[in-house]
Structures are given as C-alpha cells and as structure tokens.
Image (cartoon, rainbow, N blue to C red):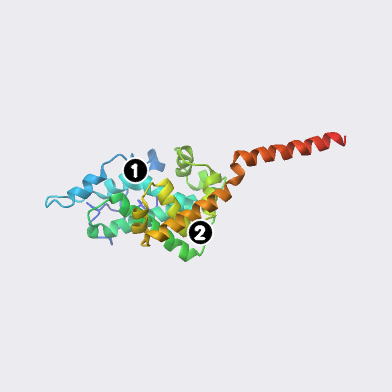
Amino acid sequence: MLRRLLRSAGEPKSVTDTADRSLPRRRTAAQGGAPAAESVQTATFAADADSPTWTPPSWEEIVSTHSGRVYRLAYRLTGNQHDAEDLTQEVFVRVFRSLSTYTPGTFEGWLHRITTNLFLDMVRRKQRIRFDALAEDAAERLPSREPSPQQVFQDTHFDADVQQALDTLAPEFRAAVVLCDIEGLSYEEIAATLGVKLGTVRSRIHRGRSQLRKALKHRSPEARAEQRSLADAVLAGEGGTA
C-alpha cells in the first residue's frame, strides 16, 4: 500500500531524525499481509511525551501502527486508490517532518487533521476530485498475491454506491461528513481539525447528509418497490401486445 512511501536506501533510527533523509523501507501490507492492527495504545504515546525519559517511537512503529487508519480515511476522502495512496504518502512525509514539533495530545486527532488538510490542499490543486474505480488491470499495476488495499477496504467497509455518493459532495462537506459519521469525531474535534467555527461544521454536516440522502434515494425500500412496479408494468404491457 505504501510502496512508494517506504521505498528507501536507508532507515532513520526514529521519526525525529533529519527529514532530508529518504524514507525507510519496511514490510508493507501489499508485500506480506494486512495493515497492522490499530489496537496499539497511542494515548500512552501522548502521555509519555511529557516524560523527560520519553523516547520517540521508531519510524517503523509509526507507520505500522497508523498506516491502515490513514489509508482508509484517505480512501474515503478521495474515492479512489491512486489518490488515496498519494495522500497517505504525503501524510507520513508530513508526520516524518513534523513530529519533533508535535504537541502531546490525541495522536489520531493529529493524523486526522494532517490527512484532511492535505486532502483539501489536493482538491485545491486539482480543482476537483472525481470517482475513479479501480480498472480491471489493477492487479497488474500493483502486483501482489495478497488482496489489494481496495479489496481489503471493500471487504470491511461500505459499497461502491455509498462511496460514489460521498464523491458527489463538495470536498468540504465530504470531509465533515466522513470525520463525523465514519471516523466518529465530535463537532468540536472536527472544528479543530478543519480550523473552522462550530456553526460551520454543523452546517456542512447537515448539508452533506442531506445531499447523501438524495444521492442514495434510489436505494430506499420505496424506490425499489417503485422500480419493481415499473418493471412489472412494462412486462405486463409486453405480454398484452403479444
């Protein structure tokens, strides 16, 4: 998953080593298994940062602990594997360069803020992000005997209809909805992550949810019943003209 991120000639001893060095190499999910479990207690990392004997975690620990979480958030925001991988790479480059200035707190919140802000920067650069499902030759572009990151994602997360509906939202609405309804952040945490007022967060989530309901209206029981009725009527009409 992080093949480009983790391709390097050398490995720094910790993430606070000079940022000018190449990023380290490690065994990735695509090379030999699913992303590392996210059960590591990162709250301990935040608390220990105040201790005079605290030692920064190694780069490998940072990536192995958080790469899965960051990639999934990146995929939800961008809607396609290519941009999600690029965004994940940018996030860990930023973490690598910024950890020495990290203020002890919720590490996941810090990652949310970096990932979301880099996503919005990406949107501003590209002007728009469109849904781009994996092409049929994805396995050739990312050769591996293990399931691709998108396959792992789809096995445990929502289907293409929902992702496609998310992609119809304006980036600011999408970020707010994803952080609230998928990542489980509070309105206050989202406001801090996005750097906007609480009222702005509420407005974006309300409007984003409203647009999602419209985009997914065809999946409602009423809509499916209406579609079946229409199909039955068409078939009945064909039978009557025979």
Q: Which residue is mark 1?
A: 27
**Percent position (x, y) of residue 97?**
28, 60
Rendered residue at 52%/42% (across/down): 159
Towards the viewer: 47 or 71: 47
**Percent position (x, y) of residue 177?**
45, 52
Rendered residue at 53%/46% (across/down): 162
Element type at mark 1: loop
Number of residue marks: 2
Say which quadrant the C terminus sits in.
top right
Residue at the farthest left position: 52
Residue 8 visible in the displayed image: no
Q: Which residue is mark 2?
A: 170
Residue 36 visible in the displayed image: yes
Badge 2: residue crowd in 10 Å (few <14, some 14–19, many ≥20): some
Element type at mark 2: loop
Q: CA distance from mark 2 to mark 1?
A: 36 Å
